[in-house]
Amino acid sequence: MRAPLVEDWPVGPRETKTAENFATSAERFVIAHEVGHILHKHLITDSAKVDLAKASLAELDKRPVEQEIEADVSGTFISIESMDKDGIDPRAAVTGIYFFLRAVQLGELVGAIEVDEAHRPAEERLNICDHVIGGRYGSHAPVLRQWARSSDELLERFARAALKERDRRRLVAAARMDEVLRTTTWSMGQRDIARDTALLKEMQSLMSHSPSAVVEALAANLCDADTYRQVLQSASSVEALERDDRWRRHQIAHFIARYAPVPVKQCLGVRFPIMGGQA
């Protein structure tokens, strides 16, 4: 087992167990947060005003921001005090709170998590949790924060490294996508199965390294139905069509998108079969 960012950094049982403990403590806070909603008798939404059969999860998960703050505060206390009752050092609970909210913050930075009126930025939520720890536990608060502060510094370093690596991978993937879409030939004739298979395998690898770079490249080269129709109508022959750069790029992007994972199709807003040709 090895760390994902630095291949020469071996990870042993101790590091693995530490990561598992962080994750377990974070999960305790998440569950405690939801228990806080229950204890405060918060309603997710007014079911009388929503068509439950058609409503999305995002539509159902709407609460006033005050309720989310209350749940964070209660979740903080429940996490810490339940750890103590279970005979576990309560410093682990505070570490879990920091760990979870720093992970959410990283998700916000990369656009994977959206901040809305109810769910405030993770940094703001962490400040609130940290403030109530000081208010409730007084002189014991610095001790409770010991592990969290140490791990928080480490997580910030990891986050900076992760973002730097993400940007590097994105540049590499974007350059390769540009090369593929610029140089790959396409014809109306019989497909080269070996070449197509190799292309899809490479695309799968690129998606695992930088999905956003692949999605953006595909979106930029897929024609909508009207544009594609115009391209077809303007071509005087099959040969002319195959020389049309817009058509060629669309065919390649269409082929890749057809066999892409469902989340990629959803990002592109496409369903198959779509107007736009063979794949």
Image (cartoon, rainbow, N blue to C red):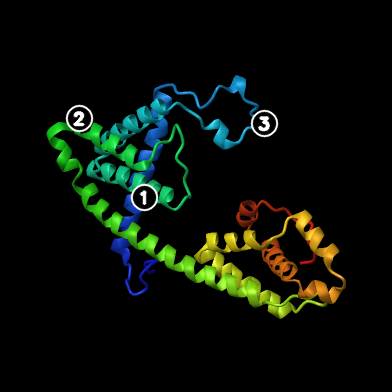
Q: Amino acid at mark 3?
A: Ala
Badge 1 crowding class, 10 Å Cα cut-off, few under 14, some 14 to 19, many 20 or more, is: some
Q: Is residue 228 visible?
A: yes
In three-dimensional space, the C-alpha distance between marks 1 and 3, rounded to whole angstroms, equals 34 Å
Front tag of 1 and 3: 3
Tell whether 256 sits left or right of 102: right
User: Which residue was labeled with disc 3?
Assistant: 53
Label 1 vs 3, first from the N-terminus: 1
User: Which residue was labeled with disc 2?
Assistant: 135
Question: In which image quadrant can residue 194 be found?
Answer: bottom right
User: Going 47% across and 27% down the picture, which residue do you hit?
Assistant: 63
Above/below status of 117 relative to 21: above
Q: Nearer the viewer, residue 48 or 266?
A: 266
Badge 3 crowding class, 10 Å Cα cut-off, few under 14, some 14 to 19, many 20 or more, is: few
Q: Is residue 274 visible?
A: no
In three-dimensional space, the C-alpha distance between marks 2 and 3, rounded to whole angstroms, equals 43 Å
Where in the figure is residue 206, as x and y percent of width and height?
Answer: 55, 68
Q: Amino acid at mark 2?
A: Gly
Disc 1 + disc 2, Cβ < 8 Å: no
In three-dimensional space, the C-alpha distance between marks 1 and 2, rounded to whole angstroms, equals 26 Å
Could you tell me which secondary element the residue under label 3 belongs to? loop
Front tag of 1 and 2: 2
User: Going 74% across and 75% down the picture, which residue do you hit?
Assistant: 186
Tell whether 44 sits left or right of 91: right
Residue lying furthest top: 48
Above/below status of 96 relative to 157: above
The circle on residue 23 is 1
